[in-house]
Amino acid sequence: MHIKCANNGICQTIDMAWKCICLDPTYYYGNYCQFETNTLQVRKVLSRSFASIAITVLVFTCSFIVLMDILKYVFHVDPVKTEREKPQKQKEEGKRAVKSNVPKVAIRFQYIS
């Protein structure tokens, strides 16, 4: 009689009877190692959901970057131009404010011999 064990189970004959021995009993069980344990089912669901979330985030990020490039280089619309220029304007205003608050003092040196 030809016995086929599922999920990489090993078929062994013990006392003239066959038995499938599952390689990892925490994941598979049954006479032919054909059933999955709850642990394996949970791991499969988590790995699928994590992979789908990761793929969705990557697709969204790439789409956003492509959209911004299309807006900037094709339609000459730069939605973040003002945000990029803010730090430079603040820096220039800060320099002007510092210069205007400092009183101007004329210093004249006289040499006495």
Image: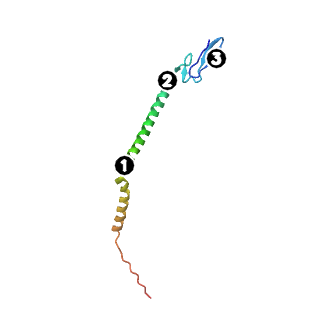
**Quadrant of the rendering where the C terminus is positioned:** bottom left
Considering only order in the chain, which callout, 3 or 1, is on the residue closer to the N terminus? 3
**Separation of disc 1 and disc 3 at Cα?**
69 Å
Is 11 in front, or is 112? 11
- In the rendered structure, the answer to whether residue 93 lies left or right of residue 111 reads left
Number of the label disc, if any, that sits on residue 38: 2
Q: Secondary structure at mark 1?
A: loop
Residue 29 locus on image (x, y percent): 55, 19
Quarter location, residue 57: top left
Q: Which residue is mark 1?
A: 74
> Taking 61 as reference, is 43 above or below it?
above
Label 2: how many Cα within 10 Å (few below 14, some 14–19, many 20+): few
Q: Does 12 appear above or below 65? A: above
Q: Of tags 1 and 2, which is closer to the observer?
A: 1
Which residue was labeled with disc 3? 12
User: Could you tell me the amino acid type at mark 1?
Assistant: Val
Could you tell me which quadrant the N terminus lies in? top right
Q: In the rendering, at what x and y percent does residue 19 appear?
A: 61, 15
Dot 3 amino acid type: Gln
Asked if labels 3 and 2 touch by Cβ distance under 8 angstroms, the answer is no
Secondary element at tag 3? strand
